[in-house]
Amino acid sequence: MIFFASFGARGAGGASPAFCRQKGSIAMLYQMKNALIRFMYGRNGSDQLARTTLFTGLGLNILAMLLGRDSHLARIFTAAATVLVIYTFFRLFSRNLSKRREENQKFLQFFRGIQSGVAGARARHADKEHKYITCKNCKTICRVPAGKGKIVVTCPKCGAQIHSKS
Ligand SMILES: [Zn+2]
């Protein structure tokens, strides 16, 4: 009887019950996707800062797992990871778009600052013909020729005298 019914269904609809089930679960996935899209409408969603805080949180969790339960550092990492993940979700679902965008921009500026700082330090390290001296007064980096012995440099920005060796 069951065989007959399934045969009948196949004959009438052209689809096996297994296929119907699959179709049903795909429809459910679409419904879930639509529900998620509706839920996220007007919310901040993912941005560079959210991805960074999420992956940093996951990374800290992995480190904590590697360190083991007894480690004091692991407990600190787990706590920091939890805070980061909660912060990530708060930003993902936030409706205050201008504030979240401002945070992301600040983060990007900070990140680019680090990148250019690293690039600059590398370039200065590669330059063997000059010595780079940082002014203690205004933090300006002054470039002087290398190999001149003891020198006194006048900062071009603030006029402070810097005693150094080149
Ligand atoms: Zn200076």
Image: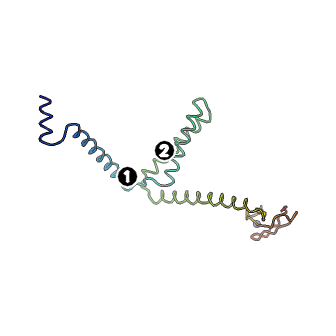
Amino acid at pointer 1: Met
Q: Is residue 121 left or right of residue 22?
A: right
- Disc on res. 40: 1
Image coordinates for residue 37, horizontal then vertical, percent: 34, 52
Between residues 53 and 103, which one lies in front from this camera angle? Answer: 53
Amino acid at pointer 2: Ile
Between residues 18 and 86, which one lies in front from this camera angle? Answer: 18
Q: Is residue 18 left or right of residue 128?
A: left
Q: Which quarter of the image is occupied by the N terminus?
A: top left
User: Which residue is labeled 2 in the image?
Assistant: 86
Q: How many marks?
A: 2
Q: Residue at x 29, y 47 (%)?
A: 30
Image quarter for ligand 1 = bottom right
Q: How is the image coloured?
A: rainbow
| Secondary element at tag 1 | helix
Cβ atoms under marks 2 and 1 closer than 8 Å: no
Q: Residue at x 37, y 52 (%)?
A: 40
- Which of the 4 image quadrants contains residue 152? bottom right
Between residues 43 and 120, which one lies in front from this camera angle? Answer: 120
